[in-house]
């Protein structure tokens, strides 16, 4: 699965350096393939191509941009099986989940932006002013490894719909699936230079994009620490930044809620993608009246997760992305000062696997309840009443997502008080057209739907 070139200016071009990055299969610890290790010179070439293409793409009518995105969706949908398989290999997502989420979700997002761009463009009048929206310019998109195509499409599709051109740097841990998007762009006839792909490390390629004078906006998804560094680099040249960062989401189970449904759904949410999900409900807050039952059930549910080969239909929990991530998660588990209530689950001897861990009686101020672990680890915390639940839920430097279970009006009231960018009430489904983003250190800006489109636009007032 080796790829040896970059996609720049509508062509496959040789990298400036002969150095490569090995892509490791986390389930086998074997080298899956290699990609080029980009340099600042490669970024310069990609930014120049994006800049050259910008004026033509920006002035293309939005409906025509929508037609290009529609063709891109068709070309990418034809690669759905390859997408799921590639993500299964380079990330370790179980195949069934990879098909539904790692392939299905980005296709849904792309479909949404194609439709949005094809719709009517409104330019409201305010007194003697006409308010228009224009593309922000050249966008540097830096994406993470946990949802490697979805996070790419969430940025690229919105930016292209808005009339921006893009320089994309996918994670060096899971870069291969981004090449499938570039292949689809060629087939769909995306104009030269509108989408450019450069692989490499964050400290080299990511830093070059974030600090590049030719990049008008940086859109980043990843850790809060890296997001802070990118924001500093962009601030030095007053460039726009959108950041989707960490999370430590609370799943609140109120008195009188359907405890069985709330716990089963909550454990599944916390362990989705082996817990490598920024929105994961990693804190389960339960009213004391149902606490003991919830703890027992959560342990049973976790114990039923089969850990192993992502391509085995019985597998529900694949490996973590890397040895470093596995060791980091195991460190949290070993240091935990709480009661482990999940049974021992066998894991393969080879691969970066971690057995699911559920802890009860967790101190809300402890490391376990405060740090984003990014692995299959769940903390259960009791509360006394709704006010207490809200205080615990908001006791976090993050504010990305959450859940509430209970009588609908009461659950809605609690959801409104949670300082977080999204809340699911009684199992409400994820909506790829709704705004996605966080409060506090979970980020700045929003992705998805019309709100995501607006992130890549400037607002102009024309007086007449």
Image (cartoon, rainbow, N blue to C red):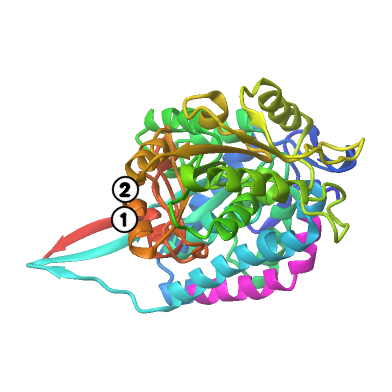
Q: Position of residue 91 (x, y in %)?
A: 76, 47
Occupied quadrant, residue 322: top right
**Disc 2: which residue:** 417
Q: Residue at x 83, y 53 (%)?
A: 310
Q: Which residues are magenta?
A: 66-86
Please name whichever residue, 212 or 433, is drawn nearer the observer in this view of the structure: 433
Please name whichever residue, 393 or 359, is drawn nearer the observer in this view of the structure: 359
Q: Residue at x 63, y 37 (%)?
A: 374
Q: Position of residue 356 (x, y in %)?
A: 73, 41
Occupied quadrant, residue 15: top right
Q: Position of residue 205 (x, y in %)?
A: 62, 35
Confirm or deny contact between disc 2 and disc 1 (CB under 8 A): yes
Q: Residue at x 76, y 52 (%)?
A: 93
Q: Is residue 85 magenta?
A: yes
**Disc 1: which residue:** 413
Q: Main secondary structure of the magenta part?
A: helix
Q: Is residue 69 magenta?
A: yes
Give neighbour class at mark 1: few <14, some 14-19, many 20+ (Cα, 10 Å): few
Secondary structure, mark 1, is helix
């Amino acid at each position: 699965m080796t790829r040896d070139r970059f996609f720049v200016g509508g062509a496959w071009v040789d990298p400036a350096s002969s150095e490569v990055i090995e892509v490791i299969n986390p389930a086998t610890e074997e080298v899956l393939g290699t990609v080029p290790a980009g340099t600042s010179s490669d970024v310069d070439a990609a930014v120049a191509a994006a800049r050259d293409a910008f004026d033509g793409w920006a002035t293309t009518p939005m409906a025509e941009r929508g037609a290009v995105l529609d063709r891109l969706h068709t070309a990418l949908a034809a690669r759905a099986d390859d997408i799921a398989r590639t993500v299964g290999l380079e990330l370790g997502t179980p195949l069934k989940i990879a098909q539904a989420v790692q392939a299905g979700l980005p296709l849904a997002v792309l479909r949404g932006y194609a439709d949005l761009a094809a719709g009517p463009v409104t330019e409201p009048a305010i007194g003697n002013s006409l308010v228009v929206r224009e593309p922000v310019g050249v966008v540097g998109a830096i994406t993470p490894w946990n949802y490697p195509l979805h996070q790419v499409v969430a940025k690229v599709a919105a930016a292209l719909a808005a009339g921006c051109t893009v320089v994309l740097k996918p994670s060096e841990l899971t870069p291969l699936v981004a090449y499938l998007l570039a292949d689809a762009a060629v087939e769909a006839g995306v104009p030269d230079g509108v989408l450019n792909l450069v692989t490499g490390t964050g400290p080299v390629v990511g830093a070059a994009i974030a600090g590049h004078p030719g990049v008008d906006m940086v859109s980043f998804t990843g850790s809060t620490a890296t997001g802070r560094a990118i924001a500093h680099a962009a601030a030095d040249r007053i460039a726009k930044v959108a950041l989707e960062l960490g999370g430590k989401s609370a799943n609140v189970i109120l008195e009188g809620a359907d405890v069985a449904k709330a716990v089963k759904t909550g454990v599944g949410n916390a362990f989705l993608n082996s817990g490598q999900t920024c929105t994961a409900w990693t804190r389960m807050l339960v009213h004391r009246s149902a606490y003991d039952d919830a703890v027992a059930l959560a342990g049973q549910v976790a114990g039923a997760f089969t850990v192993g080969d992502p391509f085995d239909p019985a597998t529900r929990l694949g490996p973590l992305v890397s040895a470093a991530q596995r060791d980091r998660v195991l460190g949290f588990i070993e240091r935990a000062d709480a009661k482990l209530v999940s049974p021992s689950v066998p894991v393969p001897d080879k691969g970066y696997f971690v057995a699911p861990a559920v802890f009860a009686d967790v101190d809300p101020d402890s490391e376990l309840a405060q740090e984003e672990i990014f692995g299959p680890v769940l903390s259960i915390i009791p509360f006394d009443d709704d006010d207490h639940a809200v205080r615990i839920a908001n006791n976090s430097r993050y504010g990305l997502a959450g859940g509430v279970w209970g009588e609908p009006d009461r659950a809605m009231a609690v959801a409104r008080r949670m300082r977080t960018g999204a809340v699911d009430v009684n199992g409400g489904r994820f909506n790829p057209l709704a705004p996605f983003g966080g409060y506090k250190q979970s980020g700045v800006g929003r992705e998805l739907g019309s709100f995501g489109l607006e992130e890549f636009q400037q607002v102009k007032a024309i007086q007449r």
